[in-house]
Image (spheres, helix red, strand yellow):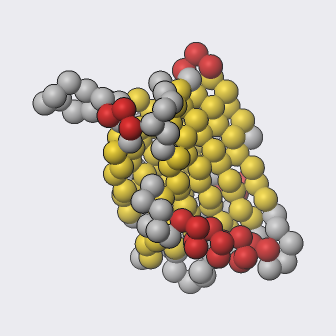
Amino acid sequence: MLVSLDAPYVDTSAADLSLAFGGPELPALYVLDLDLPGGRRIRLRLLGASHQVLLRGPAPAGTPDPVVLAETVACLPGRRPDLPSTVHEPADGYSFSATVLRPEPGGLSSRVAALRTELADDPYALVGVFPGDPDAVTALAVVPDSGSDSVRWRTWHAYPQTNELVLTETVVTL
């Protein structure tokens, strides 16, 4: 799903990002709730400062689905920027990786255009385009797998002002 956002960027480069777990749902510019195999639900949230993902597990009928994981990659006020390249917590079933790319001149625009085309009609994806530059995007895509106990999602954060593209991938094994 491709959405135009009516808000400026809050973060301005890859160096502004942090990875955080738990915490409240932050104010979102757009939210997409998805049902996944196995009775799980995932909430993709585009923030003015990047993204937040809430993974929910199944619950007994009549009770709210519990949050299994809340992951935020964003510019977080009061928090020192720190986006690790990897986090691997086998006991928690959590694995995260982040890569910062600095494409050749013109490369960011072609990567973002391809990403927008690839994800625009994907029912498990959300692409937010910020005003002022068609390359200013934050995108999230869930990779559903009905034959697995894991949930995987990827994100892209494009910063045309610094010619950076931040790629993340998370896998949660339940």
Decide if residue 21 is on the left or right side of residue 88. left
Q: Quadrant of the N terminus?
A: bottom left
The quadrant where residue 83 appears: top right
Q: Is residue 72 visible?
A: no
Name the residue furthest left: 62
Decide if residue 5 is on the left or right side of residue 156. left
Name the residue furthest right: 104
Image x and y of residue 113, in percent: 65, 76
Decide if residue 167 is on the left or right side of residue 147. right
Q: Residue at x 34, y 51 (%)?
A: 33
Q: Residue at x 74, y 40 (%)?
A: 85
Q: Residue at x 67, y 31 (%)?
A: 87
Reply above or below: 89 against 21.
above
Image x and y of residue 39, in percent: 32, 34
Name the residue furthest bottom: 132
Image x and y of residue 150, in percent: 52, 31
